[in-house]
Every structure is written in C-alpha cells, then in structure tokens.
Image (cartoon, grey):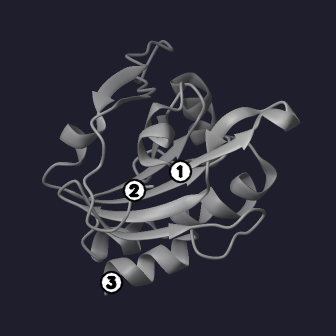
C-alpha cells in the first residue's frame, strides 16, 4: 500500500471536461497522475463509487463547501477519485455543483487503486473492485499525509480532517 513519502504512481486517469454551449464536450480527457500532480499541492480523496448515499450526502459536499478554505491553506487542487468512468464522474460533479472546486476523476479500470494498493473488493456484492475510501495530501507528487478508512467507516477521510492537515 502507498504510504507517506511515496510518489504517486504514473497511471492514466480521466476527467470529463465540458465546454459551455451547445452541449459539446472535450471529455473524457486522459492525463498521467504523476505528471498532473507535479509542482502542485493536491488534496486527493477517493470513494468506492459515485452517487453512493454517504459520499453524495457527506463526503463530496464537505470538500465542495470547504474548497475556498483549501485554496487559502495552499492547496492548488482537490481531486475526487472513484472507480467509475469519466462520464459518470462528470454527471456526479454536475449534480453536486463541483465545477471550479473539485476535479471529478474517473479510475475506470481501477489502475490507480491497484497501483496504490488502496482497493476494496466488493465482488461478492456485485460491485467489483473499487477504491477504498481515503484522503491524502500530496505535494509535488509525494504523499505527505494519508488517511485510510476502515470498512464501513467515515471518520478520517472527510474534508475537515484533510483541511486541518493542509493547514498544519
């Protein structure tokens, strides 16, 4: 499992990027995680799936609400990752009003989750391999803090905990 001091893996993730007007889009837009995080301070949080009840009611809204505080604390970007495709993440972001606050990033084939060792096997529940719920503060591509949730928990990956760590 990835740990504090490790670099983010060089894997490709995607993000749906919409263009204003006529419903056109540029997305999904693929990028290399290691290259995208270089030279930035990024608050990363991951959820098992988009549109899930806890994540839609508590997890993602907390980061959206505190986006300005994260910026004031020196965080350049907030990334929400999930083992969903970029279209699903884009739809969830639109539903949750994340534009300009939180980047909604799809890990469609769980490449990032596997590369970091932060997987959650929900095959027995018909959901396949997912991402564990966690948050991490990343500076110039290196993990500075890592908060991994226990099964069924929502205690250390929330926006308030991550914001305290960003301010420290």
Q: Do labels 1 and 2 touch, CB within 8 Å?
A: yes
The image quarter containing residue 44 is: bottom left
Q: Residues within 10 Å of mark 2 (few under 14, many from 20)?
A: some
The residues tagged by marks 1 and 2 sit, at their Cα atoms, a distance apart of 8 Å
For mark 1, give the secondary structure. loop
Percent from the top left, x then y, of residue 64? 52, 60
- Mark 1, residue position: 118
For mark 3, give the secondary structure. helix
- Left or right of 148? Residue 76 is left
For mark 2, give the secondary structure. loop
Q: Residues within 10 Å of mark 1 (few under 14, many from 20)?
A: some
Name the foreground residue: 21 vs 56.
Answer: 56
Q: Is residue 10 above or below residue 38?
A: above
Percent from the top left, x then y, of residue 58? 70, 64
- Mark 3, residue position: 167
The residue lying at 16 percent from left, 49 percent from top is 38
The residue lying at 26 percent from left, 66 percent from top is 5
Name the foreground residue: 96 vs 112.
Answer: 112
Sequence-wise first label, 3 or 1: 1
- Mark 2, residue position: 2
Which quadrant is the N terminus positioned in?
A: bottom left
- Camera-near label (3 vs 2) is 2
Percent from the top left, x then y, of residue 37? 23, 48
The image quarter containing residue 51 is: top right
């Amino acid at each position: 499992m990835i740990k504090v001091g490790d670099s983010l893996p060089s894997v490709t993730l995607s993000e749906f990027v919409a263009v204003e007007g006529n419903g056109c889009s540029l997305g999904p837009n693929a990028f290399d995680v290691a290259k995208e995080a270089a030279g930035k301070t990024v608050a990363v949080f991951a959820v098992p799936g988009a549109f899930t009840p806890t994540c839609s009611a508590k997890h993602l809204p907390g980061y959206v609400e505190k986006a300005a505080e994260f910026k004031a604390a020196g965080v350049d970007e907030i990334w929400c990752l999930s083992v969903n495709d970029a279209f699903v993440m884009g739809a969830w972001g639109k539903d949750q009003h994340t534009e300009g606050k939180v980047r909604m990033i799809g890990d469609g084939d769980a490449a990032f989750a596997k590369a970091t060792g932060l997987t959650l096997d929900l095959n027995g529940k018909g959901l396949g391999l997912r991402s564990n719920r966690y948050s991490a503060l990343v500076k110039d591509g290196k993990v500075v803090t890592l908060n991994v949730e226990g099964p069924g928990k929502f205690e250390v990956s929330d926006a308030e905990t991550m914001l305290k760590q960003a301010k420290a």
